[in-house]
Image (spheres, rainbow, N blue to C red):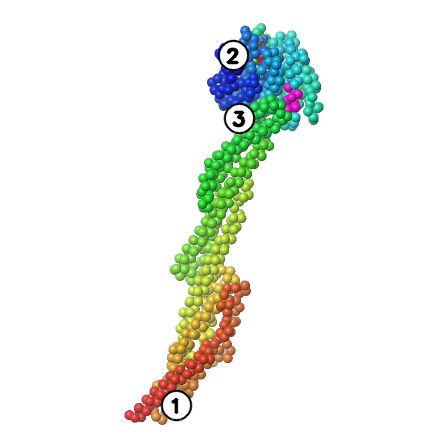
Amino acid sequence: GGGGHNRSGSIGRNGTHKKDDSNSYSNGIQVIDENKEFTPYLPAYLTAQNLITTGFSYHVVAVFGSQSTGKSTLLNHLFGTQFSVMDEQARRQTTKGIWMSRAVEDAKRSDPRGMGNNILVMDVEGTDGRERGEDQDFERKSALFALATSEVLIVNIWEHQVGLYQGANMGLLKTVFEVNLGLFLKDRSTTHRSLLFFVIRDHIGHTPLQNLSNTLMQDLNRIWSSLSKPPGLEDSKINDFFDFEFVALPHKILQPERFVEETQKLRKRFREGISPEVEVMSGSNGVDQRGDGGGVFLPVYHRRIPADGFPRYASGVWTQIVTNKDLDLPSQQELLAQYRCDEIAATCTAGFNEIMSPFEERAKAGRVLEGLGGAMKEALGEAMGGFEESGGRYHKGVFERKREDLRENLEGRLRGLVVGQFSALSKRAVQEFTEEVTGILRLANASGQSASSNYDFALVVNQTRTKVVDKFIAEASESYIPGAEWSNYESELTSLQTALDEIAAKLRGEQMQRLVARLEKAIRSKLAEPVELEFRRMEDNSEEKGNLWDRVWKVWTETVGEGVEGFLTRAGNLNATEKERDIGAWKLRKKAWGVLKAKIEEEVMEGNILLKLRENFEDRFRYDEQGVPRVWKPKDPIEQTYTTAREATLKLIPLISRIRLSSGVEPPLTEFLSDPPTDFEEDVDEMGIAKDEFEVLGEAKQVDLSTRFKRMADAVFVEAKRSTVSSVAE
Ligand code: GDP
Ligand code: MG
């Protein structure tokens, strides 16, 4: 365990890196211990220090240099940290491994919470190997770690070490540069710059800073040219990757006030934060030309790792260094990005689930989900927004890929809901449409309105159709997600409209049937009296009015004509097509013919027709030409009269037995009915014209009728004869 003492001399902490207690972080946190273990408590530390949520608004600075060159002392002066400083008496190594501490906040700053205050400072174990000579590997690795994770690396060096190319610092720098180049800087296009901030300690002042920095720069360039560089970077310059700055500090022990004064000046420069207008211009010699007083942290140095990802990033870098994996920094960033983006996506999905799961549950019922659109937008917006906010700081390529994965995943789930919603909305629209239209029709039919003109089927259908379609559009469009083609309801709307049109057509068809039936009934009742009348005067035959069938045909065609006209008017109100109207009119005419045939059949029913023939016969036999009842006298020609009357009436039987106009031909029925409309299949055969459409009484029935009539006429004659006899007898 570590045996370090802090400045106040309190007892050091054994196994500190295992502790997770923010109160014990007064010396910062041991990020990497002497066993090369990376602490698991860095997130806890950053959280305790309020840094975890700062996103990109933080800085990392590390120190590099020989053991006991006053590094910790310098850091404590610059950043107000409390890194352990070597005990003057004990003269033993104080800093084990790598420590990290947050710089003390500068309360005088205008924005005390600003980026310039969020500085993570890393104190790295000394590198002269005096105390840990057996483990130069560790020193190299910790130096490499400091270089790879920091924006600014403070290189701490005694003035008298300057120019000693073989000095421990410079030798180590060579190794570190080499490995850094091999491991992390392979791809120049994706790497960034770091600032090597040389602090020359115990500057006596004989040699001007400019001379010292020139010497150092020469050494550095020499180191660089002697490096073995990876392919493609053979010609790279040290300034391609690093900026340099040099400052000198007075001797702390000999000039304590001046030391404090100068470190305070320096301290301010580290607090400047980012000043974008200050541009680093590395001259040909690589010496920074910002001059004194400018901010130290420049945006180009920032690693673009969000604070909450820093612990994982840093440990990844460390693992890579320790295991010397031949991976480069960008892929390390990618690994981190994948890890973090997956975590963030899981969190965002959880939030999404909270909103959407209840809908998914309810969707199983197949009904319309109220509020789906709003919930979808909220859930998707929050999930994607949250992901973009937290994940957007990570490696761009990975972030974008993961974002698409997340979107696909979430939208895939919404898609199922939306498809279900559309079909539920469509189903509901169809149902409402059907219910409403049939409801109105039932009411109208019940009150007999459908037969009158103030009822407008087409209007009812159109209004209801518009209503349910508008409702569908309003609700379906709520589920629209910009950019998601599947959330477009157009095709569902089209099939809904087709479905509604089919239902309307079916309802209209039913209404048409009803209308035909109604008008058939009307024709039947209108026809009854005139036909009865014509049969009563069936023997009438005049030039002007024609015979029985001329007149029946006339009254029938007129009645049917009126009926068809009425039908066509109402069919117009039903918004029927021309074909539908043709079919309806044809059916009506055909049915009307059936009505007539039925009426005729009724008239010629045995009892009826016999009665009519008897009346006809009696009119002739019992009444004279003036319509006066005959009183038979013995000398009257009873037989003669009887025979004439009987024959005249018997002549009516062939007339009524067959429908034939006075011109001798059958009525133009086929012409009147016209051909059935083309491609109209419905019971054409059943409604087809029978073989002998115009036969009223068959041969046998005629004979039978004549026989019965004759028998009846005979009876009348016998009775007349008897009355004569009795009158003679009186
Ligand atoms: P580090 O552990 O190598 O970073 O060095 P420390 O900060 O622990 O200091 C080592 C010793 O050097 C301590 O005894 C300090 O008092 C002393 N020291 C600190 N700063 C300076 C300085 O600027 N000049 C000199 N000569 N000694 C210093
Ligand atoms: Mg130290």
Q: CA distance from mark 3 to mark 2?
A: 30 Å
Label located before the other in sequence (3 or 1): 3
Report if residue 15 lies within the magenta region.
Answer: no
**Hey, which quadrant is residue 454 in on the image?**
bottom left
Label located before the other in sequence (1 or 2): 2
* Residue 554 percent coordinates (x, y): 46, 74
Residue in the foreground of this view, choosing between 531 and 342 = 342
Q: Amino acid at mark 1?
A: Glu
Q: Amino acid at mark 2?
A: His
Q: Are marks 3 and 1 in contact (CB under 8 Å)?
A: no
- Residue ID for mark 3: 308
* Residue 654 percent coordinates (x, y): 46, 81
Magenta part of the protein: which range? 176-184
Tell me if 420 is positioned left or right of 718 in this view: right
Q: Amino acid at mark 3?
A: Asp
- Residue ID for mark 2: 5
Q: Quadrant of ligand 2?
A: top right
Q: CA distance from mark 3 to mark 1?
A: 135 Å
Q: Quadrant of the C terminus?
A: bottom left
Q: Which residue sits at x=46%, y=70%? A: 594
Q: Is residue 478 above or below residue 536?
A: above
Per the image, label 2 sits on a secondary structure element best described as loop
Q: CA distance from mark 1 to mark 2?
A: 163 Å
Q: Is residue 341 above or below residue 631?
A: above
Q: Is residue 312 above or below residue 705?
A: above
* Residue 242 percent coordinates (x, y): 64, 21
- Residue ID for mark 1: 639
Q: Is residue 272 visible?
A: no
Q: Which residue sits at x=43%, y=53%? A: 435
